[in-house]
Image: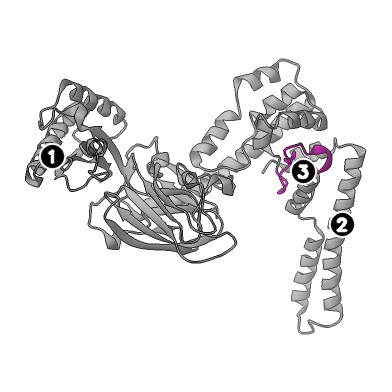
Amino acid sequence: MIDLGICIMISQRLNTTEMTNMKKLLSIYIFLHLVLYSCKKDKTENGMDNKVTSEKSMNENIEDEETLQIDMSGLMNVMGGLMTGGAVKDSTGQGLFTPEGQLNVEFLKSEEGKPMRKVFAEIAEVTEEEVDLSLTLMPDNDIVSVKHAEQIEKDLYNANVDAYEKSGRASDNFLELIAESRTTAKERTIDFKKKALKGKKQFYKDNPSWFALDESLEDTYIDYRLNMVYLPMGDISFADSVVEFIPGKPKGRAPKGSLGPAQGRLLTLKDCATLGIKGVLTLYFEDNSISDVNGPDIYVFEIGQIEPTNIEISKNGIDWINVGKIEGGTAGLDIHDFIQPGDTFNYIRLTDLDTYSGMPGADVDAVAAIGGALRMNLDSAVLFETGKHELKEEGILAIKDLAVQMKNLQKGTITVEGHTDDVGSEKTNKTLSQKRAASVATALKKAINKSAFKWKEIGYGESEPLVENNTDENRAKNRRVEILVMPF
């Protein structure tokens, strides 16, 4: 939340009518506190607590005094209600402050918020240029991940603001505004990272032999219920595409709202997928896979109450394994009891169960594989001639490019998998896929040139297609070599 000092500074510059309204609201707010105090006092004086000891009475007197103190978050809500109405509300219905009393930073930064920035400048008694500069320092109304917090900290100091501060043109109000912004933002980011670290430590406590394949990728995200979820592969951990959506009733919508990184509490229902009662959503993980770690392996970032939702996983989108359901206060799911060691899965299917709460059906912001395997796909047409396993020159270059992408990986297990379409005999395809996996593994070992990796080569033949082998286009997708990197 933007610091109270900023809000007070702005409120001090409200016009007479606005100040009168604020005083009325504040008077009502204090009156309610006095009524609560009076009721509590009457209860004690009328002997309703005749068994209370003198020590307890003393404690109650302290509580009574505390009741008289104005709850600042409540005051902020009052201020927010005032500021989102009347003179500081624009044609889009958005105000200078959110209903929760926060400065509406996202809106002010947007193109739609440009007229409101002028209002902000008038109230805060700064220039429009100073408003634009101050907004570069103000964090969004919510922090969604550690990387987001770190970016906020970087943005607190930039060349444009520094130059303006030193120019001699900066107003005192501007300097006060940015000082408050920096202080508040730093307090918020430090608090967020402190809480996030607990989530990371818990993951490694449960998985002492695990490590982040690439520490530049790892991140910790906050869900709608303020739980911290550590993901060793950061943004890569989230589902990438929608395979199928069967909307439930009342009508489900926006399946693509479930893709990509979690958005914390920033999002609205229009930013997520709504399954609807009995709705079905099938997602695909393109650059990672679901695998087993100690503790939850899948995390569904759901808005509001966690609706009972059945979860299935699949290697090929055809054969499915039911791994249970999420419901109540649990958004994570452990697949350990349903799979074989080392198995990885690329598909997940969520089916809303026949329940009803405030909103019909699950509202899904994002779906993540918590541990997961880093997954890369090479097209066989680039690597090999038809029916051959010797690498083409083009294929060698593609593998060298892949090695560059893997340069930050320090150790782990690299599994090279060969896959074919269904043309030809099953035995021939399995042999060909095994030889192709071996060719790629040999070239990739040479390109990476690190002894810290363990290597596996597997030929699956036609047994694990990505899609049905019912068209030439689909068969081309199934002819591939996949590289999976696991941190063990």
Q: Is residue 470 left or right of residue 268?
A: left
Q: Which dot, 1 or 2, sits closer to the camera?
A: 1
Q: CA distance from mark 2 to mark 3?
A: 18 Å
Q: Report the residue marked by disc 1.
A: 433
Q: Residue at x 24, y 52 (%)?
A: 343
Q: Is residue 153 left or right of residue 373?
A: right
- Amino acid carrying label 2: it is Ile
Q: Report the residue marked by disc 2.
A: 28
Q: Position of residue 253 (x, y in %)?
A: 51, 49
Q: CA distance from mark 1 to mark 2?
A: 76 Å
Label 1: few (<14), some or many (≥20) within 10 Å? many
Q: Report the residue marked by disc 3.
A: 84
Give the image quarter of residue 469.
top left
Q: Which dot, 1 or 3, sits closer to the camera?
A: 1
Q: Please, what secondary structure does the residue beneath circle 3 have?
A: loop
Q: CA distance from mark 1 to mark 3?
A: 63 Å
- Amino acid carrying label 3: it is Thr
- Whichever of labels 1 and 3 marks the residue nearer the N terminus, that label is 3
- Whichever of labels 1 and 2 marks the residue nearer the N terminus, that label is 2
**For the stretch drawn in magenta, what is the main secondary structure?**
loop
Label 3: few (<14), some or many (≥20) within 10 Å? many
- Whichever of labels 2 and 3 marks the residue nearer the N terminus, that label is 2
Per the rendering, the mark at residue 488 is none
From the viewer's side, name the closer residue of 409 and 397: 397
Instruction: Give yes or no for residue 308 being in the magenta stretch.
Output: no
Residue range of the region highlighted in magenta in the rendering: 85-102
Q: Which dot, 2 or 3, sits closer to the camera?
A: 3
